[in-house]
Image: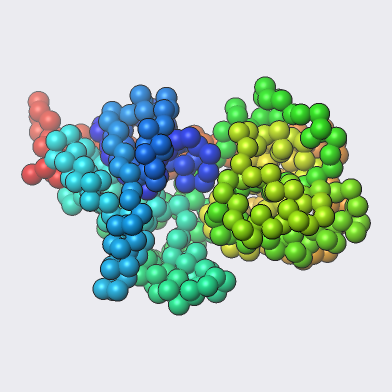
């Protein structure tokens, strides 16, 4: 059947959290249905990016978001009692396209990626709310840890109302982890809910894949952090680690380095380069050489929601991940093989001292990760929900004809 996939981001390249989820969702759904993609881009360069995934879609509509008008929409909505987030993403051109395509094409179902796109749900069509994380909870965490705490807390309340209201209207709302599902059950106990987790591209993140690791990188003894450095939970976590943990590690291991890899490091992260042993690498074309050569990978986040793709990528490469309690909580109830929970500075010191240095230990992590985090298995509940909608549509179609599009009537 024809489905409409509405996303707050372009699903390519799959190089950060939201894009990874969108990319694999669209690719998987295109194996079963005709997928019409409607999404937002931050720049014209993003909108023009080439991807084989384009050819797998029945149609593609990408609208470039102008940040100035988006901020004004968000602030006006917040002042009037609405959500900043949903108004910020409510680009008029994309809304017009959604209205047009459900009128002109035989769309039978809509998938909305993240609660920021909730208001794009067309009337008269079943929709799946793929919230992923409980974004309102992240706002409440921001309220406790960031400047402008009152505004973040207020937006948390407004966005939570959106999440709950649209979940109650949805065919089903999916969260990426049992932990997020448990939280959202307390928010919307009467809503139809499910869990559809994230996976990992094991063809790309494979220690045996064909990529080069420079000799000078292999000779160094280092821990690595990989992530989008303009994202507050990442920048906050790595700054905290460099301040609180790494000096103690250097006292025990004077030759140990900390490499910080990722796009758009802000001033606070850039300043870390002045510390002994800290190297702010910034953006790289391929993170795999850094993962492959690292003694271990760190995920010291103090704010963490949903699945941490940076952790899955490291595990798929056979690396032990030293993770904060907050990061580990996202994987409950079962911590993946290869993740060591560190709740204190001393925990990190012990974990570094006990890092495995054998190929057998590394391969056991790879095998366990592949078994648990396959995309097909994790997205199966989403595919099954759409199959149910398809069966109902077929059953209600008039004999010898095609049922009219309810959204176009």
Regarding residue 310, the answer to whether it shows in the image is no
The quadrant holding residue 71 is bottom left
Nearer to us in this view, 112 or 301: 301
Horizontal placement of 202 versus 75: left or right?
A: right
Q: Is residue 247 above or below residue 322?
A: below
Tell me residue 391's x, y (percent): 26, 36
Q: Is residue 166 above or below residue 24?
A: below
The quadrant holding residue 220 is top right
Tell me residue 398's x, y (percent): 10, 33
Horizontal placement of 378 versus 98: left or right?
A: right
Q: Quadrant of the C terminus?
A: top left
The quadrant holding residue 190 is bottom left
Horizontal placement of 395 versus 76: left or right?
A: left
Nearer to us in this view, 289 or 73: 73
Q: Is residue 176 above or below residue 208?
A: below
Nearer to us in this view, 41 or 356: 41
Tell me residue 278's x, y (percent): 77, 52
Tell me residue 385's x, y (percent): 35, 43
Q: Residue at x 11, y 42 (%)?
A: 408
Regarding residue 15, the answer to whether it shows in the image is yes
Q: Is residue 332 above or below residue 260?
A: below
Horizontal placement of 276 versus 332: left or right?
A: right
Q: Quadrant of the N terminus?
A: top left
Q: Residue at x 74, y 59 (%)?
A: 242
Q: Residue at x 74, y 29 (%)?
A: 213
Nearer to us in this view, 140 or 234: 234
């Amino acid at each position: 059947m024809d489905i409409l996939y509405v996303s707050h981001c372009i699903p390519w390249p799959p190089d950060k959290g939201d894009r990874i989820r969108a990319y694999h969702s669209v690719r998987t759904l295109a194996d079963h249905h005709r997928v019409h993609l409607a999404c937002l881009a931050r720049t014209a360069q993003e909108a023009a990016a080439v991807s084989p995934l384009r050819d797998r879609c029945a149609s593609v509509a990408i609208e470039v978001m102008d940040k100035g008008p988006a901020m004004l929409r968000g602030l006006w909505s917040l002042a009037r009692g609405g959500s900043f987030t949903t108004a910020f993403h409510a680009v008029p051109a994309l809304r017009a396209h959604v209205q047009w395509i459900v009128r002109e094409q035989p769309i039978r179902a809509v998938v909305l990626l993240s609660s920021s796109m909730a208001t794009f749900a067309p009337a008269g069509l079943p929709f799946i709310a793929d919230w992923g994380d409980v974004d309102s909870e992240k706002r409440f965490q921001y309220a406790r840890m960031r400047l402008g705490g009152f505004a973040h807390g207020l937006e948390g309340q407004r966005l939570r109302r959106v999440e709950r209201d649209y979940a109650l209207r949805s065919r089903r709302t999916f969260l990426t982890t049992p932990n997020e599902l448990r939280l959202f059950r307390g928010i919307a106990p009467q809503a139809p809910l499910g869990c559809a987790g994230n996976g990992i591209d094991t063809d790309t993140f494979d220690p045996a894949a064909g990529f080069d690791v420079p000799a000078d990188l292999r000779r160094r003894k280092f821990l690595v952090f990989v992530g989008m450095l303009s994202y507050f939970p990442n920048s906050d976590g790595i700054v905290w680690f460099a301040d609180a943990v790494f000096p103690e590690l250097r006292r025990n291991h004077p030759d140990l380095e900390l490499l910080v890899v990722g796009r758009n490091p802000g001033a606070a992260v850039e300043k870390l380069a002045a510390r002994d042993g800290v190297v702010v690498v910034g953006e790289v074309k391929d993170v795999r050489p850094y993962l492959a050569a690292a003694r271990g990978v760190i995920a010291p986040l103090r704010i963490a929601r949903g699945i941490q793709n940076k952790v899955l990528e490291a595990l798929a490469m056979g690396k032990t991940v030293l993770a904060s309690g907050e990061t580990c909580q996202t994987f409950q109830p079962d911590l993946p093989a290869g993740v060591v929970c560190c709740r204190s500075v001393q925990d990190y010191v012990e974990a570094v001292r006990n890092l495995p240095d054998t190929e057998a230990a590394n391969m056991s992590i790879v095998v366990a990760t592949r078994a648990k985090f396959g995309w097909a298995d994790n997205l199966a509940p989403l595919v099954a929900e759409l199959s149910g909608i398809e069966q109902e549509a077929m059953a209600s179609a008039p004999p010898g004809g095609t049922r009219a599009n309810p959204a176009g009537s």
